[in-house]
Image (cartoon, helix red, strand yellow):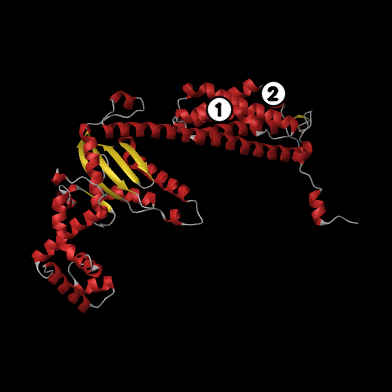
């Protein structure tokens, strides 16, 4: 019975599969073992290294003399793999790529670009393949095809192994640096630091800093039931940290979690990036969520006190239900002064006490002020008729004595609402400064 198409496919083997496992050189080109031109690995290595020094290294600005030893080992390892592969018709196993992975790891630590490592491997393979195929004759077509397949498979394995080792080392370096800089930031925030510990990780302590409190809201992916919320939060934070490094460079020290934290941005030359509306927009875009930040400028020895202040300002932003964005002391000076005495704040907010039993009236006051005292917009926000707004404002006036049709009444209501919101958001059990 003739074989079906499926059976023919199953019974078909590639030349690589037929050659694999042989103990003798099974790939012949030009009447001899294909790997013959590569057996003098020292000479071929020297030729490849010379080519790399002349034509590749200048493209990357690499210090060839410092990298020569590693480069020789890398090229030599690649040639040994190629020779063994051509002799036995089998692509090396991952376990045989140790020397290449080690070189990639060292170069990652030295800051050599990954593209330079891949290029070095590629050039070595290209030159070796040229030497292998040079003596080919017209009846070597099938052998050349097999050699080409083997070389492609080997390059895939080498590049994958080198890239994985390189990226792994880069992540470790990044984690170590991040941990070290977080230690410096923690020391400065607690004023327990010493310049020596900072120098060990390449961080120069500045005379003054922008101290930033940052709130990072949830990314939509963190609320998606079909996704891993922890992974989404880590990705958000990783994007943000990357952008902070891109915008501020080594001047930035960060203590951040998925919900926010503290940034210290060293101040120096006037041309250097500072925390402003534009830079916060870049960070928000990278994190893919709207950030809220408060910032003050501080001398280094005052950083702990300044950090407490910016986080207090951030609390005021949240309690005042302000939109995301950048806030400085001048934007929150009234709210800040209100919080200096909890007892005074309570007294100011007390004017709204009669509205506790009428939440719709309190919400009307809030919406009216947020709408710039426009009854039409207020009605639209509350989904009620403008006449209902007027009626509610008259009830507010009767209960509290605040006439929201006058400038004095508007000012009194605004301050009272700020105090009310602050007390509503304040942590239970907070110290009453005025009572002490």
Estimate the x, y position of residue 336 in percent, counting from the top left. Answer: 17, 49
Toward the viewer: 152 or 110?
110
Q: Residues within 10 Å of mark 2 (few under 14, many from 20)?
A: few
| Quadrant position of the C terminus in the picture | top left
Left or right side of 358 for 169: right
Classify 295 as above or below 425. above
First in sequence: mark 2 or mark 1? 2
Whether residue 61 appears in this view of the structure is: yes
Classify 408 as above or below 230. below
Instruction: Give the number of the disc on residue 102.
Output: 1
Q: Residue at x 69, y 40 (%)?
A: 149
Toward the viewer: 333 or 55?
333
Estimate the x, y position of residue 258 in percent, counting from the top left. Answer: 39, 46
**How far is disc 2 from disc 1 in space, using C-alphas?**
24 Å
Q: Residue at x 20, y 58 (%)?
A: 420
The residue to which callout 2 is attached is: 39
């Amino acid at each position: 019975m003739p074989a079906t198409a499926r059976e023919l496919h199953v019974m078909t083997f590639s030349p690589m599969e037929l050659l694999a496992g042989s103990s003798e050189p099974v790939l012949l080109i030009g009447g001899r073992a294909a790997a013959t031109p590569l057996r003098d690995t020292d000479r071929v290595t020297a030729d490849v290294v010379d080519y790399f020094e002349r034509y590749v290294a200048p493209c990357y600005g690499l210090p060839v003399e410092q990298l020569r030893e590693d480069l020789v080992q890398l090229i030599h390892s690649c040639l040994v793999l190629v020779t063994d592969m051509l002799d036995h018709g089998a692509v090396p196993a991952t376990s045989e790529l140790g020397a290449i992975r080690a070189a990639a790891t060292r170069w990652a630590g030295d800051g050599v670009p990954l593209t330079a490592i891949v290029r070095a491997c590629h050039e070595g393979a290209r030159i070796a393949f040229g030497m292998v195929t040079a003596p080919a004759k017209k009846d070597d077509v099938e052998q050349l095809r097999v050699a080409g397949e083997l070389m492609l498979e080997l390059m895939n394995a080498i590049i994958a192994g080198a890239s994985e080792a390189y990226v792994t080392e880069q992540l470790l370096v990044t984690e170590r640096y991040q941990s070290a800089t977080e230690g410096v930031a923690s020391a400065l925030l607690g004023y327990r630091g010493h310049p020596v510990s900072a120098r060990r990780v390449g961080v120069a302590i500045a005379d003054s800093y922008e101290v930033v409190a940052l709130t990072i809201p949830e990314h939509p992916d963190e609320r998606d039931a079909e996704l891993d919320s922890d992974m989404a939060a880590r990705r958000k934070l990783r994007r943000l940290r990357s952008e902070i490094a891109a915008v501020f460079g080594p001047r930035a020290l960060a203590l951040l979690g998925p919900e926010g934290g503290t940034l210290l941005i060293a101040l120096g030359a006037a041309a250097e990036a500072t925390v402003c509306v534009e830079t916060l927009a870049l960070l928000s875009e990278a994190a893919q969520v709207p950030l809220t930040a408060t910032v003050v400028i501080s001398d280094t020895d005052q950083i702990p006190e300044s950090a407490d202040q910016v986080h207090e300002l951030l609390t005021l932003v949240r309690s005042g239900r302000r939109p995301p964005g950048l806030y400085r002391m001048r934007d929150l000076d009234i709210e800040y002064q209100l919080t200096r005495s909890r007892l005074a704040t309570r007294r100011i907010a007390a004017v709204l006490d009669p509205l506790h039993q009428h939440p719709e009236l309190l919400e009307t006051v809030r919406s009216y002020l947020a709408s710039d005292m426009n009854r039409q917009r207020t009605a639209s926000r509350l989904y009620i008729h403008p006449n209902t707004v007027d009626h509610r404002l008259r009830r507010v006036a009767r209960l509290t004595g605040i006439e929201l049709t006058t400038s004095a009444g508007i000012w009194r209501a605004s301050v009272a609402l700020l105090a009310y919101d602050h007390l509503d958001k304040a942590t239970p059990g907070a110290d009453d400064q005025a009572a002490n």
